[in-house]
Amino acid sequence: MLSFHSRRNKGFTLIEVLISMIILAIGLLGLASLQVIALRESQDAYTMQQAILLATDMQARMRSNSGIDWLTISPNTSDTCIKSNVCTKAQLASNDYGEWTRNAQKNLPANATVKFQLSSSVNKAPCIGSTPKSLCLVTTWTRANTKKSGIFSQNATFYLEIIPS
């Protein structure tokens, strides 16, 4: 009499191992791309933080040196207002503007620009020009590795409206 015993599988087949490795590889690729996106976005957040710090620094400088038409001031290339050299308000403003632009070049990406504009000519929130002499500090930079078809634009801009006293 012949007896047929059903043979039970006691392990994984090669196909099951290959399928599980493919699923694991896809998951790891997803995690790697997520890490790349997180690093890029944290760099963009750091640049935004630097732009905010620079703008608020210049805002404090402008408020401490009142009565200056900041649109007519050009930035100094080096610090001329030191303790041994007395400066006028316009020279101090030029010195502050120059120091601000040098700090921006040092702390922002190489393609960043910083400038003053009349708020009414910017006409974007928060720089809408509610006061005739209000100024807008505009900081613009190109984001790192942003695709043109992505959610965000390639350029980022930070606006800070200041009403000089």
Image (tube, rainbow, N blue to C red):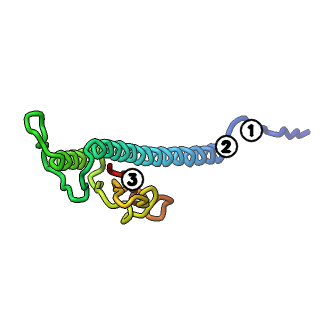
Residue at (32, 51) in percent of width and height? 164
For the residue pair 97 and 145, the one nearer the viewer reads as: 97
Label 1, secondary structure: give it.
loop
Residue at (51, 47) in percent of width and height? 29
Label 2, secondary structure: give it.
loop
Q: Mark 1 or mark 3, which has the lower sequence index?
A: 1
For marks 1 and 3, give the CA distance: 73 Å
Label 3, secondary structure: give it.
strand
Residue 13 is tagged as: 2
Relative height, residue 127 to residue 25 (above, below): below
> Amino acid under label 1?
Asn
Residue 96 percent across, percent down from the top left:
21, 45
For marks 3 and 2, give the CA distance: 68 Å
Q: Which residue is mark 3?
A: 161
> Amino acid under label 3?
Glu
For the residue pair 34 and 77, the one nearer the viewer reads as: 77
Q: Is residue 77 left or right of residue 97?
A: left
Residue 9 is tagged as: 1
Residue at (28, 43) in percent of width and height? 61
Count residues near mark 2 (Cα–Cα under 10 Å), then give few for <14, some for 14-19, many for 20+.
few
| Quarter of the image where one finds residue 65 | top left
> Amino acid under label 2?
Thr
Q: Are marks 1 and 3 in contact (CB under 8 Å)?
A: no
- Could you tell me if residue 140 is visible in this image? no
